[in-house]
Image: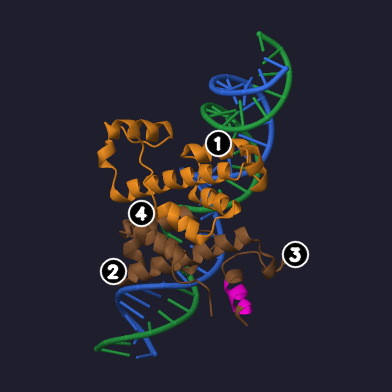
Chain colours: A orange, B brown, C blue, D green
Amino acid sequence: MIDEARQRRLEAQGWQVGTADDFLGLSAEESAYVDLRLRLSDALRTQRQRQHLTQVELARRIKSSQSRVAKMEAGDASISLDLLIRSLFALGASNRDLAEAINGASATVA
Amino acid sequence: MIDEARQRRLEAQGWQVGTADDFLGLSAEESAYVDLRLRLSDALRTQRQRQHLTQVELARRIKSSQSRVAKMEAGDASISLDLLIRSLFALGASNRDLAEAINGASATVA
DNA sequence: TGAGGATATGTCGAATCTGACATATACTTC
DNA sequence: GAAGTATATGTCAGATTCGACATATCCTCA
């Protein structure tokens, strides 16, 4: 079942999903927001790997740490959209690239 | 001169631009980031007005305050992309809408 | 003129996010 | 299986962003 896998991934990333408001109870805004984060996470990892950079190298470039980069790519809840988007720009992404990452292929799990 | 007007707007919004690194010295990442914020600000105001909502009403909807909404629309530096994007979603924006706001008409001043 | 609604600006303590670091796990290559 | 390299996870103090509130400015209409 798709939703189970997705819920597991979301919960692993620190989203409170399973309690009072069951997963399917996420409001449209909430799920749009979470989905956006996953898309950007994926885009970040893809771009970094495409450029043959290690997490350490990217971290240095954005004046952050390897652990932050790992968390960005994992979709960790402690990472802001600001940091994700700044990082994509640091990898040379344009507005067009960003728009494509947001609007392109689904970030859905499984 | 375009850049003067833009610099004034940026400085008014709290970006440190005029000191050591002159405006034209903003790195590609920095100006992409600032430009993105302006685009989202504009999109937010446009969408709010299109829906005939006051700042107070939007604030209530996103569980924030009128002053935050005003600052969002002003491109104030104390506002995160997270809040801006969450607000757009709260106004019913889709990923496609968001992508268009990011990739569409320039947010350049004057 | 002035009352009322909408928006702008400044400030605050609380909440969230940050970089850094330590440490763990995973995968090669020897 | 040790050493080396890459990535993942947990924690923390300091920085940033938050909602809320007070207050100011700007319109419009009577």
Where residue D6 appears, x then y in whole percent?
62, 32
Q: In this figure, which residue is indicated by the disc labeled 3? A: B20
Chain to which the residue tagged by mark 3 belongs: B
Q: In the rendered structure, which disc, 2 or 4, sits on the residue that comes first in sequence?
A: 2
Q: Are marks 2 and 1 on the same chain?
A: no
- Mark 2 to mark 1: distance in Å? 40 Å
In percent of width and height, residue B26 lies at 66, 64
- First to last magenta residue range: B3-9
At x 51%, y 62%, the residue is: B36
Which residue position is annotated with label 1? Answer: A70
| Mark 1, secondary structure of its residue | helix
Tell me the kind of residue under disc 4. Lys
User: Mark 3 and mark 2, same subunit?
Assistant: yes
Query: Mark 3 belongs to which amino acid?
Result: Ala
The residue identified by callout 4 is B63
Q: Earlier in the sequence, mark 3 or mark 2?
A: 3
- Secondary structure beneath label 2: loop
> In this view of the protein, can residue A94 be seen by the observer?
yes
CA distance for labels 2 and 4: 18 Å
Location of residue C1 (image quadrant): bottom left
Amino acid on which disc 2 is placed: Gln
The reply to whether residue B66 is in sight is no
